[in-house]
Image (tube, rainbow, N blue to C red):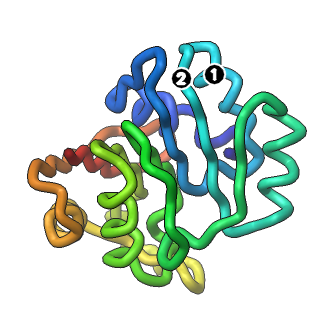
Amino acid sequence: MHAANFADYALALALLAPQPGECLLEIGMASGLHVPLILARGVSYHGFDHSADMVNAARRNAPNAMFSVADVCHDALPHADCALAVNTMQWWQSPTAALANLRTAARRLVIGVPAPPADGLVPMIGQRYFDGSALESLLRVAGFGCAHVFEATAPRRPYLVGMAA
């Protein structure tokens, strides 16, 4: 995770509220700078990123955690109590496939994505925006029976948080 994402991550982690002894999966943990904070909670952690460079950086930053290279849209994930994805969904090739994969792996999920900007800013190549109803619909289609999406005011921009179980 990049330092600029810490506020988004803190919000998502507070909502997920992993308990000691639980297993947490994270999709797109980037450099893993935040992972020692999770481990300090007594939570078992497994981070996934599509980039081998990010996985190697995370291993250096949190040597006591487990990290793997994986494509959340296609690769099977291990079972866990909960899952977290902060600022990654907007890059997934198939959000529907990725969320269905996460539903198979985890009992509950918190996902955070930038909301569409009010100024009509065009996303970077490969990135997409989701509004609240689209995010909630994707969570339900993936099989999360209880899905709730709300807009949070992040320090940098509007931010959508989806909670699902």
Helix, strand or loop for disc 2: loop
Residue 33 coordinates in the image, percent (x, y): 74, 35
Whether residue 25 is situated above or below residue 133 in the rendered picture: above
Name the foreground residue: 165 vs 156: 165
Q: Quadrant of the N terminus?
A: top right
| Residue 41 as seen in the image, left or right of residue 49 | left
Quickly name the residue at label 1.
Answer: 39
165 up-or-down from 49: above or below: above
Residue most extreme to the left: 145
Percent from the top left, x then y, of residue 2?
70, 45
Above or below residue 146? Residue 121 is below
**Residue 138: quadrant of the picture:** bottom left
Q: Is residue 19 left or right of residue 25?
A: left
Badge 2: few (under 14), some or many (20 or more) residues near its Cα, within 10 Å? Answer: some
Residue 87 image offset from top left, x and y in percent: 51, 55
Q: Residue at image x 44%, y 26%?
A: 22
x and y percent of residue 35 in the render?
67, 31
* Residue type at the position of mark 1: Leu
Query: At label 2, which amino acid type do we have?
Result: Val
Say which residue label 2 marks: 43
State the mark number for residue 111. Answer: none
Kindly identify the residue that appears in the image at 71 percent across and 64 percent down: 69
Are the residues flagged by discs 1 and 2 in contact, CB closer than 8 Å? yes
Q: Give the residue displayed 89% in from the left and 39% down from the top.
A: 60
Q: Quadrant of the C terminus?
A: top left
Compare residues 123 and 94 and report the one nearer the observer.
94
Q: Secondary structure at mark 1?
A: helix
For disc 1, the neighbor class at 10 Å (few under 14, some 14 to 19, many from 20) is some
